[in-house]
Each structure stands twice: as structure tokens, then as C-alpha cells.
Image: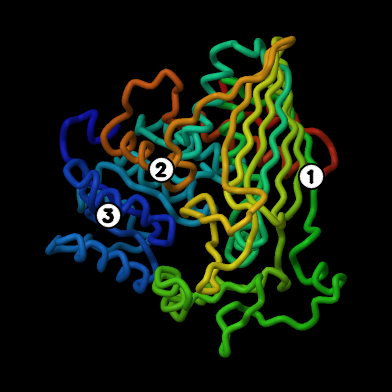
Amino acid sequence: MSSGATGMMRRYAVIGTGHRAQMYVDSMLADHADVAEIVAWCEPNPVRTDYFDDLVRASGRTSVPVRYAPDQIEQMVAERLVDAVIVTSPDHTHAEVATRAMRAGADVIIEKPLTTDLAGSRHFIEALEDTGRSLVLTFNYRYAPRNAALKDVVASGEIGEVTSVHFEWLLDTMHGSDYFRRWHRERDRSGGLLVHNASHHFDLVNWWLDDFPSRVFASGGLRFYGDENARARGLGKRPERGTTTPPSHDPFALDLRDDPRLKALYLDAEHHDGYLRDRDPFAPGITIEDNMSVLVDYTRGASLTYSLNTHSPWEGYRVGINGTEGRVELDVVERGSLLPRPDGRRDLDASKTGHVDAPGELRPRSQRILVQRHWEASREVEITGGEGAHGGGDAQMLADLFRGPAPDPLGRPAGYKDGLRSVVVGIAATSSLHIGLPVRIDDLGLDLA
């Protein structure tokens, strides 16, 4: 239940004060400060908590939230009278910390993915049944105007009954390599990119189709990053990390000193827990894939072909949805090339920044939806808005989270069933990838209906 639904100030705790937490914290300190109060941090690294305390003080507040360790979640909820926790901790911790918070009496707002494996999925189902608490997934890409406009076309029936979807997602070599620098490179922490990154994408397809998966088959591998691929391409000896003295000019290196936020949250904090945020993406120890292809069957008969590439020279995505009466296409370019800015830096994630095209860019930042019915000319669908992080999706999503969802015929707010339906595709795809066989969702023992 949200603040707006009760008409009262709600008390929030943030579990995991890393980079992703700031979106929620900034929102509660500014746009939604009248309905949301941060009363506690749950974080093992004191330097990261110091960073967020400074944000609270900079907002004009005289007191900062109380600090708790991960083994004190129940105590935190009880002592600070927490109404809801916001979970932005690493993926493999989601099931444990969120279900403990629910059993202690708090609602949950959780970053995707819901969890990384079947065991975590079952923990959520049991905790929700036992406690009756609320759980909201933050699928901000649903709120991007372009994705909502595509949903509206499909829901209108203009292209008839959907028969198939083709979805290609391209991460460029700056954003894509970042998953191979940090903890996401380890499958036991992230579940792999078919769970972590693609849960956004599978949720979009489930939402566009208003359907859920029945069978999944996948193929892929680690074909670009990692030490073996580096040796095969003759890259030679590489530094273990990107923050070096003198600074490295390697385009795959991330120097944490170039970004004040990353420096404060990770470089200045690493002596407490040993976590290195800037590892070389060609170093040993990577246990996830960088090229993935997935085929998904849906219960009402449509099929999805999906691909994820993490070393593209440009960033964006393409969607084609075929129906019995026509086709709709969405093409998005978030960054057309990876030329450095005048200061020599490159933004990590093009979807979160106001990327400026280089002069003469032949693939400019753009978004376009075309609809074409059989035996008719194509028409372009107007996309209104779209500025800001994740294609303009974050601001409206945060308003729904903290003030209660407004009436929405597109059904953008997401609950735990939506989270389950998206992550189960990634879990099944990862299993299929390793056993070489399709996986039937019914065999996983989860109720997706």
C-alpha cells in the first residue's frame, strides 16, 4: 500500500545503499518528501551509509536515518516503526531480506529482479501467503512513454491477435562491459544477465501481450569478455582494475575517480568489504554469458524470439510484434556511437543520461513506432514525453510508488506475480542454456496465473 493510498506519511527503510538506491532516496528527499520519510538504513558498509547521510543533511534535515546491519532487519522494522522497505541490495539477497522484512511487518518495494532462482521465488510466495503484506516491483521500463505507446497499440487490437514477437536488445561496449566489471559477473550473485538485465525485457513482453510464458529454450555463451576471449584475440596483459595510476586510456577501463558518486560509494568504501567496482571485464572469474538468444512460447499461442548482446558499438533496442491483421515496430537508439565527450569521459548507461549525439552522427538518438495493417500504408505513432532516466519512466513510477497508483488503463504498476512471470523466463532460459533442452514452465511448480 502506498502513502497516497492512506493519505498519511509513511516510514521507509532502505536495504542496500549502493548506486541504485539514490533514485529512491532523492525522490523521498524532494518530490515526495511530504508523504515519505526515510527512518533507517540497512547496509554493512559504513562509507556508503555516510554518503547517503550526507544527502539527507544536504536536503535540510537535521537528523539522519538510524543504521542497522543486515542481521538486524526485524529489529529495524520494529524499532523504527517501518511501514515499507525499499530493497536495492544485490540480487542474490532479495529473497532473504525482503521476506524477513515482510514477516517482521513491513511492505516491500523491490528492484528487479524479484529473485535469482526458484528457491527464492518459493520463499516470496510463502511469505506473501503467510503475511498478506504488499510487494511492488519497480519495472520502470513499463512507464517509458514509447513502451506504453506500444502497449496501447497492441491492446487496441489494431494489429489483431498477436502471433509472434521479435525483440533485440543491444548494450554497447561501455554499458555492456560494466556488467562484467562488478558483482553481476558472478552467476551466484546475479543469476546471469537473462535474470538480472533481461527481467526488464521479459516483463515488457508479458505486459505487452497480457500473457505469461509456457515454454522456454535458450542458447548463448561467454564469447567476448573474459580472460579466454582476451587471449584468443591477443589483447595481451591487462590491469586488474580500471582505476590505475597513471590513468588508463583503455576504452574498457572504468576509472572510479572520474565519477564522484562512484568514487564515494565504491572506491572510498572498498577497504571495508573488499568489493572492487572497476574490475577488468577481461579478467578471470566471469561465470555469466555475454551473448544470449531465447525462444519463449506463451499460453495463448504467441512466441517470442529474444536476443541480448553486450558488446555492440551502439545501444538501443528493436521490437517487432506481428498480428493477424498487421505489424507494429518500435526502434530505439539510446546511443549511436561511443565517441568520448570533450572531457574524454563516456557515460556508463545511455538510458539514464541525456546523451548528446556526436556531430554528423548517422545513427542519432531516436525512437519511432510504426504500425502497418495488411494492405495499408504504414503510419507513425506519436510518442509524447520520454525525457529522463529509462526513457522517461522513472518519474511516473516513483509517483505511483510513493503516492499510490493513478487510474491506469495500461496497468503499469507491477506486483509480485509480474515479477515472478518475468524472472521465471530468465531462470528457465538459464537452465535451458546449460542442459540444451527446452524447459516447460509448468514443470517448475510455480503458479503464474
Q: Earlier in the sequence, mark 1 or mark 2?
A: 2
How far apart are the two marked residues, 1 and 3, measured between alpha carbons? 41 Å
Q: Earlier in the sequence, mark 2 or mark 3?
A: 3
Residue for badge 3: 76
x, y percent for residue 189: 59, 57
C-beta proximity under 8 Å, tags 1 and 2: no
Instruction: Give left or right: position of 43 versus 205.
Output: left
Quarter of the image holding residue 226?
bottom right
Instruction: Kindly report which numbered mark, 2 or 3, lies closer to the viewer in this rendering.
Output: 2
**SS of the residue under disc 3:** helix
Q: Earlier in the sequence, mark 1 or mark 3?
A: 3
**Disc number for residue 433:** 1
**SS of the residue under disc 1:** helix
Residue for badge 2: 394
Q: Residues within 10 Å of mark 2 (few under 14, many from 20)?
A: many
Q: What is the three-letter code of the residue carrying label 2?
A: Asp
Residue at position x 78%, y 58% in the image:
222
